[in-house]
Image (cartoon, coloured by chain):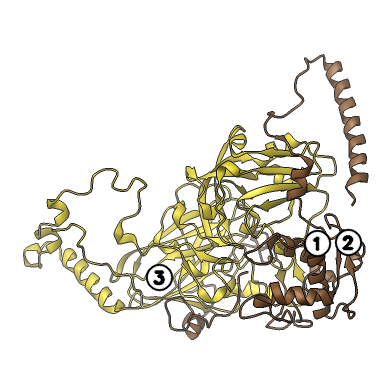
Chain colours: A yellow, B brown
Amino acid sequence: MSRKKRTSIETDLTASRRDFLRSSIAAGGALVAGGTVAHAESDPAITDLQEWARYLGDGVDNAPYGVPSEFEKHVVRRHVGWLTASVESSVNFTPLHELDGIITPNGLCFERHHGGVAEVEPDKYRLMINGLVEKPLVFTIDDLKRFPRQNHVYFLECAANSGMEWRGAQLNGCQFTHGMVHNVMYTGVPLRYLLEEAGLKTNAKWIMPEGGDSSGMNRSIPMFKALDDCLIAFKMNGEALRPEQGYPARLVVPGWEGNMWVKWIRRIEVGDEPWHAREETSKYTDLMENGKARRFTWEMDCKSVITNPSPQAPLKHDKGATVLTGLAWSGRGTIPRVDVTLDGGRNWHAARVDGPSLDKSLHRFYYEFDWNGEPLLLQSRAIDSTGYVQPTKDELRQARGENSIYHNNGIQTWHLKKSGEVENVEVS
Amino acid sequence: MLKFPEGIAVRCAAAATVLAGLFMAQALAEPSKPSKGFGLGRAATVEEVQAWDIDVRPDGQGLPKGKGNAAKGEAIFAAKCAICHGDFAEGVDRWPVLAGGVDTLKSDDPVKTVGSYWPYLSTAYDYIYRAMPYGNAQTLKPNEVYSIIAYLLLMNDIIEDEEFELSDENFTTVRLPNEKNFIDDPRPDTPTLKDGEPCMKDCKPEVKVTKRARVLDVTPKNEDENAGRGAID
């Protein structure tokens, strides 16, 4: 008998959810009948001899590069077809509702490309520094690895994350509403070392990183940031950058919008003025209600979202002990406080931040409670180490209108229903 | 190009710094050693820098020699750009609209084009050369780029003469109408802890659901995947 012959798991969220919920609740019910076990129906998961308990499994090296269990095949990045004209200049989304802790696995980090994934040959990789420097330089990837390295966990969030929700609730799932964010440990070298190696001239005030891909992605970054905490990274979570994340080297701009984290970085020009490139004028500027547009809106504001329960992750149990969890982050620092409400913002409770609290990194929060089985309106509100308070969506709209696309960090509401299903809503 | 006069000025400043440094070193009687750095990387050649130094700034820095007019640009645009952007830069399907959109920025359907939104014309040169045509980037000749830009100016009613020769010499004299409407980042623009502690108890008398995703359900896996509003690019 093949050990591959296994029952398929429920992956279609729209199909027979009620039946699914009922059966899981029934299974749980049998277990908690407690004390009268003799009268309960026995569980075949225990009484039947399972094939994995009987037959030998795969040997070592069956998967030289390990992959997740086949039962986790639904845990993937997904894209939204109507958002963009082509998949090469598009985005997909991290499945936040399937993850826990603070680290995003490399294969699940959302992708955003403007000219497809560049397949850069590492032997032909070069990083050039030119412009207002004493000595224009060229580095190979091996050269970069000879500078002193640093390790930092940073979130990367696209400025357009939640951008589809400005006019109201639109997408059912935190993967789609909030999934343009990921959080990995980068290994790299401080950009400052490279700039100092080339020697900055006295009027060097800006840098322009440029990608080696077919979009030649370029942005202007002020020198104070370049010299502060930017990295040229070549590892993520310990292994080489994935091609879709800029292999073999990318720029890391902690706390600032993801578009600036130029992938496949080939060149850094040093200048005395910003370049006003396409991605900082036509795009990634925030159009206000009065027709004015904010530019150079670099910092990612403090934000949070409940990842479970959420539309793609309904509650599958009856009333009783429930774990609510989510993510919070800020481009300005750490997250000392997250509040959670179950009644749409009438009353708030302190959530518990668990795991590392690192600068400009995702934070994991939990709020454990007894669900009474009644509908709830769930929200989280993060406050960062600078005292910035995550605003409501109405506060944001009042300040900016509905056309800004970018930097929507408003409080998300999930409507948990009696069935355990969850819908993306807004509340008064 | 502005690089040369600046270079001279910087070199003078650098020489002054070196002199000051020598004086300090003597005064402190420290042993001489490499001033700084790890000695990694190698000097870029002039040809290498020229090959990659493709950026163009609003002040004209980086513009290559060349010229073109809208009449020539129309033919190039039809052959290399119109399949996505339309014959008149009006945009096909979800591909970017490049012309029109004037007076829409305050509406609930702003159309952000070169004419209605972009602050600087140099962005068009920088972007078109580095990223266009989509899938065949960095292949246009300078005269082709100038011609395409002249055509875009014509389609946006910024110039009226299709024989007007746009060149590296007159490029910075062309200003785009929306330049003045870009402002600095004023955030935070919502209440912070300085404005008071957020409410924790009995914060509102009642709560009503005001908007539902289900009203316009455009989540992937649902029937009409093309019904959504908004864009991320």
Residue type marked 2: Asp
Q: Is residue A234 above or below residue B66?
A: above
Q: Nearer the viewer, mark 1 or mark 3?
A: 1
- The residue to which callout 3 is attached is A312
User: Residue B20's x, y, as percent?
Assistant: 89, 26
User: Residue A313's x, y, as percent?
Assistant: 38, 68
Who is closer to the viewer here, A202 or B197? Answer: A202
The answer to whether tags 3 and 2 share a subunit is: no
Badge 2 crowding class, 10 Å Cα cut-off, few under 14, some 14 to 19, many 20 or more, is: some
- The residue to which callout 1 is attached is B142
N-terminal-most mark, 1 or 2: 1
Question: Left or right of B67: which side holds A289?
Answer: left
Assess whether mark 2 and mark 1 are in contact (beta carbons under 8 angstroms).
yes
* Residue placed furthest toward the left: A38
Question: Left or right of B136: which side holds A34?
Answer: left
Label 1 SS: helix
Query: Spatial distance from mark 1 to mark 2, Cα to Cα?
Result: 9 Å
The circle on residue B168 is 2
